[in-house]
Image (tube, rainbow, N blue to C red):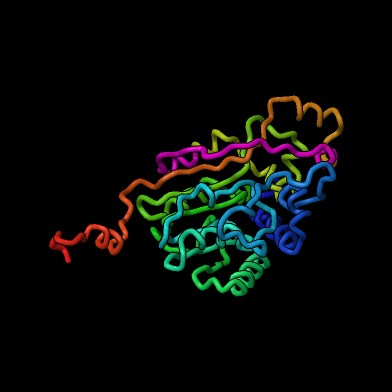
Amino acid sequence: MKNSDQIKSLVREKYSKIASQDQAFNMASCCGAGDSSVEVYNIMTDDYSDLKGYKSEGDLGLGCGLPTQFAHIQKGDTVIDLGSGAGNDCFIARHETGETGKVIGLDFTPAMIEKARINAEKLGFNNVEFREGDIEEMPVSDNIADVVVSNCVLNLVPDKPKVIKEIYRVLKPGGHFSISDVVLTGNLPEALQKDAEMYAGCVSGAIQKGDYLDAIKSAGFSNIKVQKEKPIIIPDDILGKYLDQQEVSEMKNGTLGIFSITVYAEKPGAKKIKVLQETISACAPGSGCC
């Protein structure tokens, strides 16, 4: 595989193209990279359509989970979405945090940022903003977010521990994240490990599940939980582009596992109480506080 800068350039190039692709094509391929499968219509993505706040304009079919469903977003929260794409998870987070909250989407692909901003303007969402930037060096201040979400993005980043440390930095004390991502148990065949499309397709950039969880713990997070886990089955007609029939069979029947996991973790510290809300609820008649 290429070096870090080459990988980032590859991902940016691929996702600039993916930004203009049809959702159905993206869902029937590995995150929109390479050819789509004729065997299945949905390789990685979960169905967002029943979630409150869902806007089809923002859904490019690129995720591998539903992190916002598990993120425990409260009214008035500030939420950051890493790799925000066309805005899908941002718009759902906006429904949860309400007009008093704020949602910041980060993406380093200009075509995605442009698409997301157009969607937000059409929807009239004034408290959702999209910033262009590398999530290894997030363009946001320390201790700003109550919640961080991300959907099938960290596997695309060369330095995953650095991103996890950045998540820790931008979260407020007592804040938390819910992130869906692709992880492995066992080793990918060499042909898949080295392929650019499989990297952009969220597969060859995935790391071992144990290493992923260890990096979260090493960054200082606590109360780490796997909220959801599901296997990802790559169809034979896609695998056949990279492997011969024997290699496909060995991969299917071996010890390799490719999974989508949604992970929750907290930054230690006392979460700041929304003072006004607490004061109103505590100020009962006759209490002497009002």
Q: Position of residue 188 (x, y in %)?
A: 71, 34
Query: Is 132 or 39 nearer to us in this picture?
Result: 39
The mark tally for this picture is 0
Pick out the residue farthest to the right. 245
Residue under the image location 85 percent in, 45 percent down:
38
Q: Is residue 225 magenta?
A: yes
Q: Residue at x 14, y 61 (%)?
A: 286
Quarter of the rendering occupied by the C terminus: bottom left
Relative placement, left or right, of 99 versus 230 is: left
**Residue 108 visible, this angle:** no
Percent position of residue 243, x then y: 83, 36
> Residue at image x 68%, y 60%?
12
Specify whether residue 63 is in view. Answer: yes
Toward the viewer: 200 or 49?
49
Q: Residue at the front extreme? A: 285
Q: Position of residue 252 (x, y in %)?
A: 76, 29
Q: Is residue 185 magenta?
A: no
What residue lies at 61% left-to-right and 51% top-to-bottom? 153
Against 82, residue 42 (above or below) is above
Which part of the image, by quadrant, shows the N terminus? top right
Residues rendered magenta in the picture: 215-240
Where residue 91 appears, x then y in whole percent? 56, 62
Position of 254 with respect to 167 (left or right) is right
